[in-house]
Image (tube, rainbow, N blue to C red):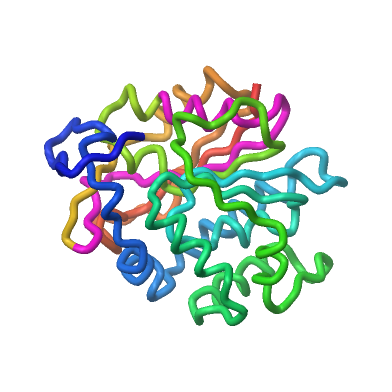
Amino acid sequence: MVDNDETGGASGAGNADYQWAKFDSEAYFQHYYGEPHPDDDLVIRVAVEALKGALPTDEKLDIVDVGTGPNLIPFFCALPRARRLTAWEYAETNVAWLKEELSRDAMRPQWQHFWGVTRDAYGPEWQLPDNPIPALREMCVVTQGSIFDLPRQSWDAATMFFCAESITGRQDEFEAACAAYARSVRKGGTLAAAFLVRSEGYVVADRPFPVLKLSPETIEGVFRHHASNVRAELIGIVDREIRSGYSGFIFLTGTAD
């Protein structure tokens, strides 16, 4: 990604047209996760289901989350399966926010809720701790980098929550981002990703950011070039936005080629 100081508010604006260096991480967290919504719990449950089945199921995995943003949910979902966790995040504000959040011993009430959902989704047989932060602090590496610069075939599994479609208004850039994400996983590894649907864009601290309009068929078509067993499912679709830019999501799973 390339950052500049001009906002590309027009439809079809590219990634470089938005003010990523001025992304307000705490404002994003408060708006999107300040009050947990049942759809947040759904995202966790479908992601956990995908990661529980990630091969090989009897081994710990090297897992990357791409475009993590100000969000610990990807870490929660991956922690029980992970040997090592990487957050691959572009915005420097988000990198600093994640490092600060992981440095705290106590969890915010929202994280307590989402970790509870994660523990329930995995089930008691996993014997997960009351507080995952110490384990995450030991296991996680927060890396500042662009999705377009992901190294190839470097992880056993990869998650991505609302990233590739919300960094650009251009189809070609979206497809390039998805390709880089899929290729970052070793052959046979698991892809699990959530995408915004029916969104016109989103606003963080009065700054507009893009969302590309997608359908399950569009996403499946993109990922079939890079993965097998591709499935994209519409989940939680409503007529009116629940939050800025959000009225439901598409969840994709696949196996990296």
Q: Which residues are magenta?
A: 176-205
Q: Residue 102 at what x, y percent from top left?
A: 57, 68
**In this orientation, which residue lies closer to the viewer: 17 or 251?**
17
Q: List x then y, in percent, for residue 68.
A: 48, 51
Residue 187 forms part of the magenta stretch: yes
Residue 164 part of the magenta-drawn span: no
Is 171 on the left or on the right of 54, as rendered? left
The N terminus: image quadrant? top left
Judge whether 207 appears above or below 13 on screen. below
Q: Residue at x 49, y 76 (%)?
A: 110
Residue 85 rendering spot, x and y as whole percentages: 66, 50
Q: Disc count in the image?
A: 0
Residue visible at 48% across and 61% down in the picture = 71
Which part of the image, by quadrant, shows the C terminus?
A: top right
109 shown above or below 52: below
Q: Report the side of 151 relative to 22 (left or right).
A: right
**In the depicted structure, whether residue 116 falls above or below residue 237:** below
106 vs 68, left or right, is right
- Residue at 63% in and 28% down: 229
